[in-house]
Amino acid sequence: MAVVNFSNTILPAVTGYDISGEVVAVGKAIKDLKVGDEAFGFLSMNSSGGGGAFQQYSVADADRIVKKPQGLSHTDASTLGIGFLSAMDGLRQVKINSSTSIFVPGGSGGVGHFIIQVARILGAGQIITSASKEEGINILKELYKIKDVINHATENVVDRVLELTGGQGADIVFDTTYLESSYAKSTLTVKRGGSWLILNRRILDKDSQAMKNVEQRGANLIQADVSRYTLGPEKAQVKSFFQESLVQGAKWVEEGKLKPYVNKIIKLEEVESALEQLTQGKAGFGKVVAEISPN
Ligand SMILES: NC(=O)c1ccc[n+]([C@@H]2O[C@H](COP(=O)([O-])OP(=O)(O)OC[C@H]3O[C@@H](n4cnc5c(N)ncnc54)[C@H](OP(=O)(O)O)[C@@H]3O)[C@@H](O)[C@H]2O)c1
């Protein structure tokens, strides 16, 4: 679940972007999918057209949907939406190899836990992350085998990242927290000339401390913003970006390289309170999945 109204959808509308289920009808021009197929992907960012995942039947644009392989559960498939796609969009814009260090504030989040895993799959040599809750820190260390997990509530994040990177800072810092307080710190952890990635610039003030730090460090500011493929200038790439990323994500899950963390599976009527918990930072590690029966 992701709750920011990225597309400025006019309310009331049914929300929710990420989906996995059975195809019950297709448009005449659709060749790749047929009724009865199991499919997953990402709904239109303007759900007033009948999209919106939090309902029994949703209308999807076919260029953002792919067939679900048998080895991938609907639960896991439904997590490979906006959070995973945002991780893919950010990491495809930077070079990663075995000498690359990356710092991901909030690796316990729905987006963050995908970034640390994709960075590892792409071969990053050093992955540093942060979280504050004991459960999240343990999951990052034990399940995802991240050695360097900083407690952002009790430790000095900037000092710790500099210490872990020989005083230089990380080559890549991918901050998905949407928090100015985190941005002001994470920009100080980027290596001179390195890359600072955020989800989008909406809360980034040009006069902010974060922007001053980016300029001082000569860092590249990169946005991972999937809305540019659906609503913005890169519409031509919509099919290739979404479908290639979804197919790749499914393959990684089937191969056991990517492990979406599903914290809770809830019913449709529990969505509102789950979204409330999410906005209060109380949803727990990783993703929450709503299971919706056909009747
Ligand atoms: N533009 C996009 O494409 C896009 C895509 C997906 C999501 N989003 C948005 O991006 C944000 C993050 O999404 P999410 O699903 O990952 O949220 P989430 O699951 O709630 O995760 C937030 C993470 O931030 C960490 N955090 C909280 N305070 C922090 C601080 N002061 N410093 C460092 N880390 C801190 C939390 O760690 P602890 O709980 O362990 O402290 C948690 O890991 C949301 O606002 C979401 O709506 C945007």
Image: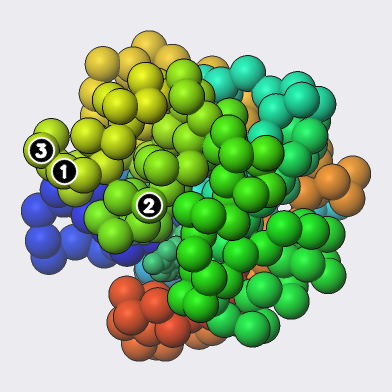
Q: Are marks 3 and 1 in contact (CB under 8 Å)?
A: yes
Report the residue marked by disc 3: 207
The amino acid type, in three-letter code, at marker 2 is Lys
Image spot of residue 86 (x, y percent)? 48, 40
Q: CA distance from mark 3 to mark 1?
A: 4 Å
Where is residue 243, by image quadrant? top right
Q: Quadrant of ligand 1?
A: bottom left
Is disc 3 placed on a helix, strand or loop? loop
Q: Which residue: 30% across, 36% down?
A: 213
Front residue of this view, candidates 3 and 222: 222
Where residue 193 is drawn, which disc sits there?
Answer: none
Front residue of this view, candidates 2 and 177: 177
**Mark 3 near ligand 1 (CB under 8 Å)?**
no
Q: Residues within 10 Å of mark 1 (few under 14, many from 20)?
A: few
Image spot of residue 176 (x, y percent)? 42, 50
Q: Which residue: 30% across, 27% down?
A: 216
Left or right of residue 16: residue 145: right
> Where is the N terminus found, in terms of image quarters?
bottom left
Front residue of this view, candidates 172 and 165: 165
Lower sequence index among marks 2 and 3: 2
Q: Are marks 2 and 1 in contact (CB under 8 Å)?
A: no
Left or right of residue 251: residue 115: left
Report the residue marked by disc 1: 208
